Amino acid sequence: MTVVKAPAGTWRGERQDEGWTFRGLRYARADRFAPPEPVPPHETTVDATRSGPGAPQSPSRLAAVMGTPAPVPQSEDCLRLTITTPDPQGSRPVLVWLPGGAYLTGSGEWNFYDGRRLSAEGDLVVVTVSYRVGALGYLYAPGTSDGNLGLQDQLAALRWVQENIAAFGGDPDRVTLAGQSAGAHSVAALLGIPDAARLFHRAVLQSAPLGMPFILPHAAERTAGTFLEHLGADPLTASVEQVLTAQTRTVIQLAGRFGLNTAPAFGPVADAGPLPAPPAWHRALVRRAGRGLAVLLGTNRDEMRAFHLRHPLFTRVRALPVIGEGLADRARHRAQEKAFDGPNRQFADLLASSGADTYRYVFGRLAPDNPLGACHCAELPLLLGDDAAWRDAPVLAGAPAADLAAAGTRMRSRWSAFVHDGAPGWPRHTPGGAAHPLP
C-alpha cells in the first residue's frame, strides 16, 4: 500500500508488479443531464484499491470480438479514473486513455484497459477515464439536456489531470491524449476545442471512425424525439433501466430495417456545449496542428469484419452460391473505405500539411487463420490489459502466444516512445504517403 496526497485529496493505492495503481478516483460529479462539476478536496484518506463504477450501459456489441470484461459496478456516479504509475515520485510523461464503445458502452475501469504493463515497460503514467455514454451522455434535447455531456466529462478529467497528476509522478506538461474507436473520435473532437489546447500536448487516434461526422443539431433533436417517445416518462426521474431500454429501442429503430446504419445514435453534436460548429472546429484544429502538435493515428486492415462477419444480412449474402463471398467482401471494403480508411488518410494529410508531426500506421492480422482478421479492436490486447484479461478474446484465437508477446512488446515500445518524445520510431507522414505497417 502507498498513500498519495494531491490537491484534490489523499488516496491509498495498491502496489502491483512494478508500480502502483489507484482505482476509481472521482474527478467530478454530475446530476443527470447536467454538466460535470469539480469535487471539493476530501480530507480523509480514501481507499483506491477497488475499481470504481462505469457508466450505465447495455452489453457491448463487440463482445464477440473482444470477449467480456471483468464485471464492474454501474452507476450514474461514474466520473472516475484509474491511475497507474511506476512510482509516485518523479516526473514522467502521461498517457490519458479514452475507451471506445460507439458512445454506448465502455469504461476506463475495465480490465481490458489496465495500464500496468504499459506503464512499467514504458516508464510512464497511465490514466484511464470513464465518462457518460449513450443518452445519459449525449442526449441533445434543449430544455432537458444540452448535449455533449460525455465530452464535457472528458474535459473535466483532463483538467483534473493537469491539477493533480504531479502527485502521482506525472508531468502535466507532457500529456498525451489517446483513444480507440469512439474514444479516438472524441480525441478528434477535442483537438478542435480551443479550451482543450492547454490540457494535452500529443494525441493518439486508434481506429477513429472519422467518416462519421459530428451530429448536426437538427438530427440530434430528431434522435432525442425518438428516444423520449420510447421512454414515455420524465427523463429526469425515469429509472436507469427505463433509460437503457428506450436507448436500445432508439438504436434499433435508427439502424433501419436491415441494421445497416451503423453510425452511433448518440455522440458529439456540432455547435453544442464546448464543441464548435464544423468550420470553427476545423480552423481550431489547423491552428493547433501548426503549433508543434504530434499525432499518431491509424486503422486496422480489416476493421469492418467486426461488424459484418456475424451480421445477419451479410451472413445470408455470403451463403449465395459462387458470388456470395465476393459481394460481401466488396460491401465490406466499401464500408471500411468510407468509415475508416479514407477519412483517416485525409485527416493525416490535413494534419501533416498544417504542420503537425504526424505518424500513420495500418495494423495487420495477428492470426492468419482467424476469420476476424485485423478487425476493429484487434490491436488493443497488444497495448493495454494483460494476458488474463484477453485470454478468451475471439480476435486472438489461433495467434501463437510467443508471437503475441513479441508483437505486444514492440507496440508498447512504439507507443511509449511517442508519449516520451513525440515519435514512434518510423518516418513522419507526408500528404499522400503510405501508412507504416504494424505490428
Image (cartoon, rainbow, N blue to C red):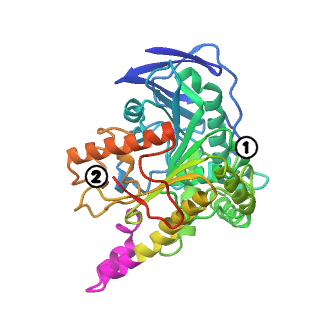
* 433 and 163: which is toward the camera: 433
Where residue 385 appears, x then y in whole percent? 37, 39
User: What numbered label is drawn on residue 396?
Assistant: 2
- Residue 435 falls left or right of residue 321: right
Label 1 sits on a secondary structure element that is helix
Please tell me whether residue 309 belongs to the stretch shown in magenta.
Answer: yes
Residue 18 relative to residue 78: left or right: left
Gap between marks 1 and 2, in whole Å?
39 Å
Neighbour tally class for label 2: few under 14, some 14-19, many 20 plus, Cα within 10 Å: many
**In screen coordinates, is 373 left or right of 132?**
left
Q: Which mark is residue 195?
A: 1
Specify the amino acid type for callout 1. Answer: Asp
User: Are the residues flagged by discs 1 and 2 in contact, CB closer than 8 Å?
Assistant: no
Is 162 situated above or below 44?
below
Image coordinates of residue 373 in percent, x first then y, are: 31, 62
Majority SS type along the magenta span: helix
